[in-house]
Image (cartoon, coloured by chain):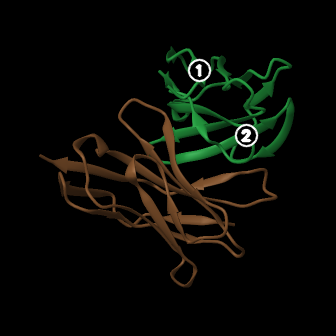
Amino acid sequence: AQSVTQPDIHITVSEGASLELRCNYSYGATPYLFWYVQSPGQGLQLLLKYFSGDTLVQGIKGFEAEFKRSQSSFNLRKPSVHWSDAAEYFCAVGARGSGDKLTFGTGTRLAVRP
Amino acid sequence: DSGVTQTPKHLITATGQRVTLRCSPRSGDLSVYWYQQSLDQGLQFLIQYYNGEERAKGNILERFSAQQFPDLHSELNLSSLELGDSALYFCASSTDSFPQYFGPGTRLTVL
Protein backbone atom coordinates (compact mmCIF):
# COMPACT_ATOMS: atom_id res chain seq x y z
CA ALA A 1 0.00 0.00 0.00
CA GLN A 2 1.20 3.49 -0.71
CA SER A 3 1.86 6.13 1.92
CA VAL A 4 2.94 9.75 2.04
CA THR A 5 4.91 11.64 4.66
CA GLN A 6 4.98 15.39 4.97
CA PRO A 7 7.50 15.96 7.75
CA ASP A 8 6.71 19.63 8.35
CA ILE A 9 3.40 20.39 10.02
CA HIS A 10 3.88 24.16 10.01
CA ILE A 11 6.23 26.40 8.03
CA THR A 12 6.53 30.17 8.20
CA VAL A 13 8.34 32.14 5.52
CA SER A 14 8.67 35.83 4.78
CA GLU A 15 6.93 37.27 1.76
CA GLY A 16 9.32 37.22 -1.17
CA ALA A 17 11.40 34.39 0.25
CA SER A 18 11.75 31.03 -1.45
CA LEU A 19 9.75 28.02 -0.32
CA GLU A 20 10.29 24.29 -0.29
CA LEU A 21 7.73 21.88 1.14
CA ARG A 22 8.88 18.32 1.63
CA CYS A 23 7.06 15.18 0.61
CA ASN A 24 8.28 11.60 0.81
CA TYR A 25 6.30 8.68 -0.52
CA SER A 26 6.35 4.94 -0.20
CA TYR A 27 5.15 2.86 -3.12
CA GLY A 28 6.44 -0.27 -4.82
CA ALA A 29 6.05 0.84 -8.42
CA THR A 30 6.20 4.11 -10.32
CA PRO A 31 3.98 6.46 -8.39
CA TYR A 32 1.66 9.14 -9.59
CA LEU A 33 2.32 12.20 -7.46
CA PHE A 34 0.27 15.28 -6.76
CA TRP A 35 0.30 18.52 -4.82
CA TYR A 36 -2.92 20.21 -3.74
CA VAL A 37 -3.54 23.45 -1.89
CA GLN A 38 -6.41 24.14 0.49
CA SER A 39 -7.22 27.68 1.53
CA PRO A 40 -9.23 28.17 4.73
CA GLY A 41 -12.84 27.13 4.28
CA GLN A 42 -12.24 25.93 0.73
CA GLY A 43 -11.90 22.69 -1.12
CA LEU A 44 -8.62 21.44 -2.51
CA GLN A 45 -7.11 22.80 -5.68
CA LEU A 46 -4.70 20.78 -7.79
CA LEU A 47 -1.36 22.59 -8.14
CA LEU A 48 0.53 20.05 -10.21
CA LYS A 49 0.95 16.36 -10.90
CA TYR A 50 3.63 13.95 -12.04
CA PHE A 51 2.80 10.87 -14.08
CA SER A 52 5.98 10.27 -16.08
CA GLY A 53 8.62 11.99 -18.18
CA ASP A 54 10.42 15.16 -17.11
CA THR A 55 11.00 14.94 -13.38
CA LEU A 56 10.63 18.71 -12.92
CA VAL A 57 6.96 19.57 -13.11
CA GLN A 58 5.54 23.05 -13.48
CA GLY A 59 2.22 23.88 -11.94
CA ILE A 60 -0.14 26.76 -11.42
CA LYS A 61 0.54 29.87 -9.33
CA GLY A 62 4.30 29.67 -9.99
CA PHE A 63 4.83 26.36 -8.18
CA GLU A 64 7.05 23.54 -9.33
CA ALA A 65 7.97 20.13 -7.95
CA GLU A 66 10.77 17.69 -8.60
CA PHE A 67 10.40 13.92 -8.56
CA LYS A 68 13.50 12.21 -7.18
CA ARG A 69 13.12 8.47 -7.36
CA SER A 70 16.35 7.78 -5.47
CA GLN A 71 15.09 9.79 -2.50
CA SER A 72 11.39 8.85 -2.86
CA SER A 73 10.63 12.54 -2.75
CA PHE A 74 8.42 15.02 -4.55
CA ASN A 75 9.19 18.39 -2.97
CA LEU A 76 7.19 21.48 -3.86
CA ARG A 77 9.03 24.74 -4.50
CA LYS A 78 8.30 28.36 -5.24
CA PRO A 79 11.02 30.96 -5.80
CA SER A 80 9.16 33.90 -4.25
CA VAL A 81 6.22 33.48 -1.89
CA HIS A 82 3.25 35.84 -1.90
CA TRP A 83 0.99 36.52 1.07
CA SER A 84 -1.85 34.83 -0.81
CA ASP A 85 0.09 31.54 -0.75
CA ALA A 86 -0.73 31.10 2.94
CA ALA A 87 -2.73 27.87 3.01
CA GLU A 88 -2.42 24.17 3.70
CA TYR A 89 -0.56 22.05 1.19
CA PHE A 90 -1.15 18.36 0.65
CA CYS A 91 1.03 15.89 -1.16
CA ALA A 92 -0.67 12.76 -2.50
CA VAL A 93 0.30 9.52 -4.19
CA GLY A 94 -1.81 7.46 -6.52
CA ALA A 95 -1.54 4.16 -8.31
CA ARG A 96 -3.09 3.05 -11.57
CA GLY A 97 -5.23 0.01 -11.22
CA SER A 98 -6.49 1.01 -7.79
CA GLY A 99 -9.39 2.97 -9.18
CA ASP A 100 -7.48 6.21 -9.17
CA LYS A 101 -7.38 6.15 -5.39
CA LEU A 102 -5.24 8.88 -3.83
CA THR A 103 -3.47 8.62 -0.52
CA PHE A 104 -2.85 12.02 1.03
CA GLY A 105 -0.20 13.22 3.42
CA THR A 106 -1.15 15.01 6.62
CA GLY A 107 -0.50 18.42 5.12
CA THR A 108 1.83 21.34 5.75
CA ARG A 109 0.36 24.62 6.89
CA LEU A 110 2.16 27.59 5.40
CA ALA A 111 2.14 30.98 7.06
CA VAL A 112 3.59 34.03 5.29
CA ARG A 113 5.16 36.90 7.23
CA PRO A 114 4.63 40.34 5.70
CA ASP B 1 -14.76 28.25 -8.38
CA SER B 2 -13.96 24.65 -9.28
CA GLY B 3 -17.30 23.98 -10.94
CA VAL B 4 -18.08 21.20 -8.46
CA THR B 5 -21.07 21.98 -6.27
CA GLN B 6 -21.97 20.38 -2.97
CA THR B 7 -25.07 20.74 -0.88
CA PRO B 8 -25.68 21.43 1.88
CA LYS B 9 -22.71 23.48 3.09
CA HIS B 10 -23.40 22.68 6.71
CA LEU B 11 -25.38 19.93 8.33
CA ILE B 12 -26.06 19.48 12.03
CA THR B 13 -27.78 16.34 13.16
CA ALA B 14 -28.05 13.92 16.06
CA THR B 15 -26.50 10.54 16.65
CA GLY B 16 -28.41 7.70 15.06
CA GLN B 17 -29.78 9.84 12.27
CA ARG B 18 -29.33 9.50 8.52
CA VAL B 19 -28.22 12.25 6.13
CA THR B 20 -27.66 12.61 2.41
CA LEU B 21 -24.91 14.74 0.90
CA ARG B 22 -25.19 15.78 -2.70
CA CYS B 23 -22.54 16.53 -5.29
CA SER B 24 -22.74 17.82 -8.85
CA PRO B 25 -19.51 17.34 -10.79
CA ARG B 26 -18.07 19.74 -13.32
CA SER B 27 -19.87 19.63 -16.60
CA GLY B 28 -18.55 16.73 -18.64
CA ASP B 29 -16.68 15.03 -15.80
CA LEU B 30 -17.59 11.35 -15.55
CA SER B 31 -15.70 10.50 -12.37
CA VAL B 32 -16.86 11.47 -8.91
CA TYR B 33 -14.86 10.89 -5.75
CA TRP B 34 -15.86 11.25 -2.11
CA TYR B 35 -13.36 12.12 0.59
CA GLN B 36 -13.69 12.62 4.34
CA GLN B 37 -11.47 15.13 6.10
CA SER B 38 -11.16 15.12 9.87
CA LEU B 39 -8.55 16.36 12.31
CA ASP B 40 -7.57 12.92 13.53
CA GLN B 41 -7.79 10.95 10.26
CA GLY B 42 -6.81 13.59 7.74
CA LEU B 43 -8.08 13.17 4.16
CA GLN B 44 -9.49 9.71 3.61
CA PHE B 45 -10.70 8.34 0.29
CA LEU B 46 -14.19 6.90 0.58
CA ILE B 47 -15.42 5.87 -2.84
CA GLN B 48 -15.21 6.61 -6.56
CA TYR B 49 -17.84 6.37 -9.28
CA TYR B 50 -17.25 6.52 -12.99
CA ASN B 51 -20.20 7.12 -15.29
CA GLY B 52 -22.62 5.57 -12.85
CA GLU B 53 -20.56 2.56 -11.87
CA GLU B 54 -18.62 2.08 -8.65
CA ARG B 55 -14.94 2.05 -9.55
CA ALA B 56 -13.05 1.96 -6.27
CA LYS B 57 -13.74 1.75 -2.59
CA GLY B 58 -11.60 3.11 0.17
CA ASN B 59 -12.14 3.38 3.88
CA ILE B 60 -15.89 3.64 3.62
CA LEU B 61 -17.90 2.30 6.53
CA GLU B 62 -20.76 -0.12 5.95
CA ARG B 63 -23.09 2.52 7.38
CA PHE B 64 -22.16 4.74 4.43
CA SER B 65 -23.25 4.27 0.86
CA ALA B 66 -23.12 6.26 -2.33
CA GLN B 67 -24.43 6.27 -5.85
CA GLN B 68 -24.02 8.19 -9.06
CA PHE B 69 -27.12 8.95 -11.09
CA PRO B 70 -27.58 9.06 -14.89
CA ASP B 71 -27.16 12.84 -14.86
CA LEU B 72 -23.79 12.18 -13.13
CA HIS B 73 -24.60 13.83 -9.84
CA SER B 74 -23.75 11.76 -6.82
CA GLU B 75 -25.13 11.29 -3.34
CA LEU B 76 -23.38 10.05 -0.24
CA ASN B 77 -25.69 8.54 2.36
CA LEU B 78 -24.55 8.34 5.96
CA SER B 79 -26.70 6.39 8.40
CA SER B 80 -26.70 5.50 12.09
CA LEU B 81 -24.52 8.52 12.60
CA GLU B 82 -21.98 8.59 15.39
CA LEU B 83 -20.10 11.48 16.95
CA GLY B 84 -16.96 10.35 15.13
CA ASP B 85 -18.61 10.89 11.76
CA SER B 86 -18.37 14.64 12.27
CA ALA B 87 -16.07 15.83 9.50
CA LEU B 88 -15.80 17.70 6.23
CA TYR B 89 -16.97 15.63 3.30
CA PHE B 90 -15.54 16.58 -0.07
CA CYS B 91 -16.65 15.59 -3.49
CA ALA B 92 -14.25 15.82 -6.40
CA SER B 93 -14.56 15.18 -10.10
CA SER B 94 -12.31 14.60 -13.08
CA THR B 95 -12.49 13.94 -16.79
CA ASP B 96 -9.75 11.37 -16.88
CA SER B 97 -8.06 9.93 -13.84
CA PHE B 98 -7.55 11.01 -10.24
CA PRO B 99 -9.51 13.79 -8.58
CA GLN B 100 -8.82 17.12 -10.17
CA TYR B 101 -11.55 19.50 -9.07
CA PHE B 102 -12.81 19.55 -5.50
CA GLY B 103 -16.03 21.03 -4.27
CA PRO B 104 -16.22 23.35 -1.24
CA GLY B 105 -17.29 20.50 1.03
CA THR B 106 -20.15 19.73 3.40
CA ARG B 107 -19.38 20.18 7.07
CA LEU B 108 -21.24 17.54 9.06
CA THR B 109 -21.65 17.96 12.79
CA VAL B 110 -23.14 15.08 14.75
CA LEU B 111 -24.35 16.01 18.24
- Residue A49's mark? none
Horizontal and vertical percent for residue A71? 51, 82
Q: Which mark is residue B47?
A: 2
Image quarter of residue B80: top right
- The amino acid sitting under disc 2 is Ile
Q: Residue at x 57, y 38 (%)?
A: B36
State whether residue A40 is above or below residue A61: above
C-alpha separation, residue under disc 1 versus residue under disc 2: 17 Å
For disc 1, the marked residue is B5
Q: For chain B, what colour was chosen?
A: green
Q: Nearer the viewer, residue A71 or B22?
A: A71
In the figure, the shade used to draw chain A is brown
Give the residue at x 78% y 23%: B72
Q: Residues within 10 Å of mark 2 (few under 14, many from 20)?
A: many
Give the x, y percent position of residue B60: 70, 41
In this view, the residue in front, B61 or B46, is B46
In the shown orientation, is residue A113 left or right of residue A65?
left
Q: Residue type at mark 1: give it.
A: Thr
Mark 1 lies on a secondary structure that is strand
Q: Give the residue drawn at x 29%, y 51%.
A: A110
